């Protein structure tokens, strides 16, 4: 009988301030931990480099972990007060900054309308004028999620019932390659990265990722880990599926125009077709089923979609500002 060794866990990232330093020092420390101080959380920019990296490091304990960090650190009580303070600060900022007031149908319907001029669209920029190096940067940042694609959304499945659960499982089955490992979307994205000459190791580009890229990934983990936010995770998931197909069409064209390679083009071409179907399932079955059983979660569904849009807009602004100024969007070379 042969066994396949798991790929090595990523190394701990480099701290970006006192909050992330506090977390990373604790994760690397041997033996019992003292409860981590929450000082500085209230004054920190909730979308800033330091708190977002601190959250990212804490959340990665629920995925692959880090080299040299014991598995038992995942639910280490000493880490929880700081994690909760960081989460609450992040959530409070999101609730204050999203428009609010719209129904789930109104919020998702607005996502189907592309803004005139496409001035804030990264996919449009990459399709028409993006360079291959900009595509490489984009893929490096997106790898923080796509190399674990669908994993954060699994947490909502035990919290759903009936149509909502069945619809969610049907979509996730596709995300995981319909039972074929070589067709898993995370594997397809690794193949895309290979075409672009990028490192495919999980977590490799964390130190290169700016705060807006970390925040996009942190949001889905935060919503997934809290049962009380199951409606918001469904809203987040719906936002991703609704916007994926048109964006993927543009990105497939960008890969083709720049000669990025067949696997690079295939990843996004696959999402054009798959996510067009997923959009209908998530709207009719997942959201429809959830709100039929728990109508009180409608505001949460709308919040999840709006918070996702807000953070994606932050990331788009970061990328386009850097590229239009002729400079890299990564914090450091990959």
Image (spheres, rainbow, N blue to C red):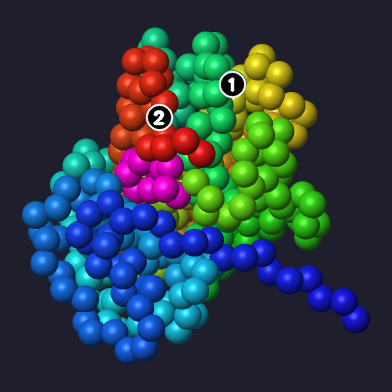
Q: Residue 318, labelled with which disc?
A: none
Residue 267 is at least partly visible in this image: no
List x then y, in percent, for residue 147.
59, 51
| Callout 2 crowding tier (Cα within 10 Å): few <14, some 14–19, many ≥20 | many
In the displayed orientation, state which residue is furthest to the bottom: 32
Magenta span: 206-215
* In the image, residue 180 lies in the stretch drawn in magenta: no
Mark with earlier residue (1, 2): 1
Residue 22 is at least partly visible in this image: yes
* In the image, residue 208 lies in the stretch drawn in magenta: yes
Residue at 73% x, 71% y: name it. 5
Q: Foreground residue, 108 or 322?
A: 322
List x then y, in percent, for residue 295.
35, 60
- Res. 209 image quadrant: top left
Left or right: 174 as drawn, with respect to 254: right
List x then y, in percent, for residue 310.
31, 38
Q: Are marks 1 and 2 in contact (CB under 8 Å)?
A: no
Q: Residue 329, labelled with which disc?
A: 2
Residue at 43% x, 62% y: name it. 12
Q: Is residue 317 above or below residue 171?
A: above
Q: Foreground residue, 37 or 187?
A: 37
Residue at 21% x, 76% y: name it. 36
Left or right: 124 as drawn, with respect to 332: right
In the displayed orientation, state which residue is furthest to the right: 1
- Res. 233 image quadrant: bottom left
> What is the secondary structure assignment of the residue under circle 1?
helix
Q: Residue 132, labelled with which disc?
A: 1
> What is the secondary structure assignment of the residue under circle 2?
loop
């Amino acid at each position: 009988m042969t066994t396949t060794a798991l790929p090595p866990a990523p190394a701990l990232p480099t701290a970006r301030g006192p909050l992330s330093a506090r977390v990373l020092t604790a994760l690397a420390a041997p033996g019992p931990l003292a409860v981590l101080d929450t000082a500085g959380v209230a004054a920190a920019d909730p979308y800033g480099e330091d708190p977002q990296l601190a959250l990212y490091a804490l959340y990665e304990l629920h995925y692959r972990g880090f080299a040299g960090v014991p598995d038992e650190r995942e639910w280490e009580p000493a880490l929880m007060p700081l994690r909760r303070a960081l989460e609450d600060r992040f959530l409070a900022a999101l609730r204050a900054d999203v428009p609010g007031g719209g129904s789930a149908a109104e919020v998702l319907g607005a996502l189907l309308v592309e803004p005139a001029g496409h001035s804030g669209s990264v996919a449009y920029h990459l399709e028409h004028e993006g360079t291959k190096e900009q595509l490489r940067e984009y893929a490096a940042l997106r790898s923080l999620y796509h190399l674990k694609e669908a994993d954060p959304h699994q947490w909502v499945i035990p919290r759903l019932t009936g149509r909502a659960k069945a619809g969610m499982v049907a979509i996730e089955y596709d995300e995981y390659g319909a039972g074929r490992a070589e067709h898993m979307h995370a594997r397809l994205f690794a193949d895309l990265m290979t075409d672009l000459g990028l490192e495919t190791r999980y977590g490799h580009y964390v130190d290169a990722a700016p705060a807006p890229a970390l925040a996009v990934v942190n949001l889905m983990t935060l919503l997934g880990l809290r049962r009380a936010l199951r409606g918001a995770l469904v809203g987040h998931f719906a936002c991703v599926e609704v916007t994926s197909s048109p964006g993927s069409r543009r990105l497939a064209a960008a890969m083709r125009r720049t000669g990025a390679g067949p696997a690079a083009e295939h990843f996004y071409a696959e999402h054009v077709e798959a996510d067009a179907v997923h959009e209908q399932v998530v709207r009719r079955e997942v959201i429809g089923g959830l709100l039929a059983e728990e109508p009180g979660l409608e505001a949460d569904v709308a919040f999840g979609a709006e918070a996702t849009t807000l953070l994606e807009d932050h990331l788009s602004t970061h990328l386009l500002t850097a590229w239009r100024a002729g400079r890299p969007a990564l914090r450091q070379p990959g």
